[in-house]
Structures are given as structure tokens and as C-alpha cells.
Image (tube, rainbow, N blue to C red):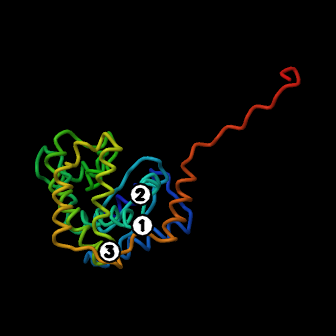
């Protein structure tokens, strides 16, 4: 199912095909997946879109948008988002989280996956019109679980584990659609837990030259093209 959804996504979305950026994102995903016990490396692809989006499918098929990459301010934040998506996969947030609410049969679940717009197990990073009514409260616990797992993956991979919480906290205020998808109280409580239980270490990775290059190129590609100034006619002079 995950492979089918990934193929469908690549066919229906405009994908980024810059080799250096794609290789960097894939490598970062593989590094984090090693600490998640998925049993297979994560496959991370980039959707060429200014929207803030992230998709997580069974089998470790992940998609993040170029707009999301441009919004992160450090490699640790980008790693945090990918780790959060991996957390959904590792926790098994897939078909049972995608039930249409009309029953518990496999037919209902598959219909939502393949014919509905809400296909990803990550509620926070779905598009504005992709979240069915009633899902926010029902699946908020799954988001907290993915946060908790992401913190562990980041720490094991030597990234600052607070980065994922910092990113979602500022994204919450920048993206009005996310205000009801995550609670500031939940993020504050989890941050306090991390600060108490996981003291900071001096060798945590915060950023890198590879991240800076990838983010700069992605951000540049998202800037609106400036129309050339019209040529002056002799009569205008």
C-alpha cells in the first residue's frame, strides 16, 4: 500500500529533481531511519511546492515539500520534521488511523486512502483542505507519539532533540490552519520533559554546510519571478 501511494503521489505532484538536493534529503532520511527500527531505509522525496506539506506512508515512503525545507532554519529542524514523519511510520499510524469513520472494515479504510484526499498519517502537515472534520481531536495523540519518537531519533543521530518542537511551535503561529492541529500546552509540556530528562550535549548537530546549500537553492527556486521592466517607447522619453 505504501509503495502504491508513493507512486500515486509522484505521478500527481510536481516533484523536485535536483540531484544534489534530493541526495542530501535522502541521506538525511536514511540516517534518521537507522535509529527507528523500520527494517528498511526510508525513502524521502521532495515535492516542488511552496506549501508547507509532509506525507508519511507505510513502508517508510516520505514526502516533504520544498516550501517546508525553505521554512526550516537549521539542519536539526529539518531532521526533526523527517524524524516526526518516520515516527508515524514506526508507530504504525497508517490504515487504522485513516478509517472513514463509517465502519472498521478494510474496505472503508482503503477507500479513504486511495480515493480520498487525506492519505497521509501526519495530521499536522496535511494540506488545508485535506483534514476531515472530527480528525483533529481523534488523532492528536498520534501526533504526540510521533513527536516523542522523533525526539529519540534525533538524540540518537546526534541532533538537538528540541529542534522538532521549536520548529512546530513557530510553524503553529505562522500557519493559522495549524492552530487547532497542535496545542501550545502540549509542546511546552514536551519541551519541559526533554529539558529535564535529556540534558543538552555540546556535540549536538545544529546545522551544516550541506543544509545551507540545499535550503538556499530551494528558497531561491520559490521566489516569484520578477517581470522585466517594459522597454520605453521613444514617445515616452
Q: Which mark is residue 72?
A: 2
In primary-sequence order, the first of circles 3 and 2 is 3
Residue 213: x, y in percent? 55, 65
Q: 192 or 11, which is in the foreground?
A: 192
Distance in Å between CA atoms under marks 2 and 1: 8 Å
Q: Give percent across and percent down for residue 73.
A: 43, 59
Q: Are marks 1 and 3 in contact (CB under 8 Å)?
A: no
Give the structural element (helix, strand or loop) at label 1.
helix
Indicate the position of residue 121 as horizontal and vertical percent values.
25, 56
Residue placed farthest to the top in the image?
Answer: 235
Q: Nearer the viewer, mark 1 or mark 3?
A: 1
Q: Is residue 80 above or below residue 47?
A: below
Q: Residue at x 47, y 47 (%)?
A: 50
Residue 170 makes an appearance in the image: yes
Nearer the observer: mark 3 or 2; the answer is: 2
Looking at the rendering, which quadrant does residue 116 occupy?
Answer: top left
**Label 1, label 3: how far apart the Cα atoms are:** 16 Å
Give the left or right position of residue 62, taking residue 223 as reference: left
- Residue under numbered circle 3: 33
Front residue of this view, candidates 28 and 111: 28
Q: CA distance from mark 3 to mark 2?
A: 20 Å
State the image coordinates of residue 66 (x, y, percent, origin top left).
47, 55
Judge from the rendering whether residue 110 lies leftward or rightward of residue 141; answer left or right.
Answer: right
Residue that carries the numbered disc 1 in the rendered image: 75
Does the image show residue 1? Answer: no
Amino acid at each position: 500500500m505504501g509503495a502504491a501511494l508513493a507512486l500515486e503521489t509522484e505521478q500527481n505532484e510536481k516533484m523536485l529533481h535536483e540531484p544534489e538536493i534530493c541526495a542530501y534529503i535522502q541521506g538525511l532520511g536514511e540516517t534518521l531511519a537507522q535509529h527507528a527500527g523500520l527494517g528498511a531505509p526510508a525513502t524521502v522525496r521532495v515535492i516542488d511546492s511552496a506549501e508547507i506539506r509532509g506525507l508519511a506512508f507505510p513502508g517508510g515512503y516520505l514526502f516533504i515539500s520544498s516550501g517546508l525545507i525553505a521554512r526550516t532554519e537549521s539542519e536539526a529542524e529539518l531532521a526533526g520534521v523527517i524524524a516526526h514523519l518516520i515516527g508515524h511510520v514506526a508507530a504504525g499510524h497508517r490504515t487504522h488511523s485513516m478509517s472513514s469513520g463509517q465502519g472498521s472494515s478494510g474496505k472503508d479504510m482503503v477507500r479513504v486512502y486511495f480515493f480520498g484526499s487525506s492519505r497521509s498519517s501526519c495530521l499536522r502537515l496535511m494540506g488545508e483542505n485535506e483534514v476531515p472534520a472530527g480528525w483533529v481531536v481523534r488523532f492528536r495523540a498520534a501526533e504526540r507519539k510521533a513527536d516523542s519518537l522523533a525526539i529519540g531519533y534525533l538524540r540518537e543521530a546526534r541532533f538537538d532533540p528540541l529542534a522538532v518542537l521549536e520548529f512546530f511551535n513557530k510553524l503553529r503561529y505562522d500557519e493559522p490552519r495549524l492552530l487547532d492541529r497542535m496545542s501550545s500546552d502540549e509542546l511546552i509540556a514536551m519541551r519541559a520533559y526533554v529539558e529535564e530528562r535529556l540534558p543538552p550535549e555540546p556535540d549536538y548537530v545544529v546545522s551544516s554546510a550541506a543544509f545551507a546549500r540545499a535550503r538556499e537553492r530551494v528558497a531561491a527556486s520559490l521566489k516569484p519571478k520578477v517581470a522585466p521592466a517594459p522597454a520605453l517607447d521613444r514617445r515616452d522619453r
